[in-house]
Image (cartoon, helix red, strand yellow):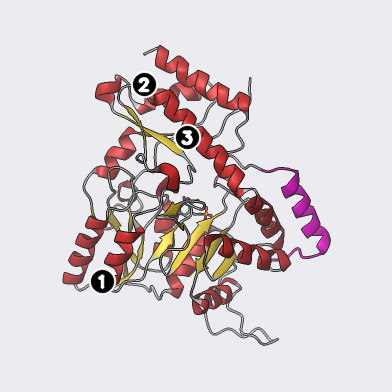
Amino acid sequence: MAERILMSSPDVTQAEEDAVVAAMRSGWIVPLGPDVDAFEAELAARVGVGHGVALSSGTAALHLGLLTLGVKPGDVVVTSTMTFAATTNAIVYTGADPFFVDADETTGNMDPELLRIALEQLRSDGAHVGAIVPVDLLGKTVDYTAILAIAAEFDVPVLADAAESLGATHRGRAAGSFGQVSAVSFNGNKVMTTSGGGMLLTDDEGIAQRVRYLATQARQPVTHYEHVDVGYNYRMSNLLAALGRAQLKRLDSMLARRREMRELYKDVFRQVPGVEIFGGADDAEDNAWLTSILVDRESAGWEAGELSAALAADDIESRPIWKPMHLQPVFAHHRGILTGTSERLFARGLTLPSGSALTGPQRERVFESIGRFLRGR
Ligand SMILES: Cc1ncc(COP(=O)(O)O)c(C=O)c1O
């Protein structure tokens, strides 16, 4: 049987292997070193911000971002319901109370008008809103123009969850450069990877310094291990930073492969009634991390789950779009402004293999499987 095709597997070459071996031979096999420093500088320059702090995960970047923005137990943090659990987990780690905002129908991203309603409601309830955490869903940025204006009006800082959107832009400006702080992820399934890792990006030098300090167990600069704060062991290993640097050099070509896959899906589904590519037409700014389709059962005559089952039978991975956080048993007791949009997207959406490492024959297998399914309807 042919090997299983995954939605987004790591795309590594000889260049990455050489970089990791060189870092290993350099002796810097610790969570600091020249590759960490260079990776931070190179990614910050690519995104156009002053500072990057390389960390062990995107979740760590979210957690420390919230702490350095001053989020504390009892605060409310307003966030997208349509996201991966890591966003909400990081909020809960701080002791704050997540408040979910439903999605815009076209992009699945936080609806700015609902954000305004949420902030008005929370203000009249007397709640202290510590931060807003909008999430760039599947590689398409939120409407930062609208969201940052509303945040400024209510005087609330923004931590942008750009875990999925590295390489995307909003009105020409890079994802990862919005808000007081942004968090990106280099998990194995992202557009570029360090196997596991993340980075906090900011223009605020004080925030960057504080995050670096908290991420290294909050050690005071003395020899005898003095601590005045609770710290975390969240720094990125130098070996993984070397891998990240090699990936960053290939980022544009990897993004081009994902965009190519998006175009191929568009060609396949253009003629299929009841199916649309999720995310709207404006995808020049999208990094095409994952391509999803929305299936309208009435006009298609089939539903997303049936295509998913057909792909699974051919050993090809596909999944629904994120299950909204307000539907998750662990988070269902938190409040939100909910309209049903994210639930509809969850019910109708299917995410398809989108990775840049997919070979020609693997792509063919995916399209043959989809073709067979469609012909059989
Ligand atoms: C929206 C979102 N936020 C945060 C994360 C967490 O990143 P990491 O896996 O690097 O901790 C991810 C992905 O894993 C994500 O998709």
Between marks 2 and 1, how big is the CA–CA gap? 45 Å
- Residue plotted at (56% across, 41% down): 256
- Residue 13 among magenta residues: yes
Q: Is mark 1 within 8 Å of ligand 1?
A: no
Which residue is disc 3 drawn over? 262
- Residue plotted at (29% across, 74% down): 155
Is residue 134 something one can see in this rendering? yes
Instruction: Identify residue type, mark 2.
Output: Gln
Tell me the tag on residue 154.
1
| Quarter containing the C terminus | top left
Tell me the tag on residue 271.
2
Please identify the residue farthest to the right as the structure is shown: 25
Please identify the residue farthest to the top as the structure is shown: 376
Q: Identify the magenta region.
A: 12-30
State whether the magenta stretch is mostly helix, strand or loop.
helix
Disc 2 vs disc 1: Cβ atoms closer than 8 Å? no
* Residue 137 vertical placement versus 345 (above, below): below
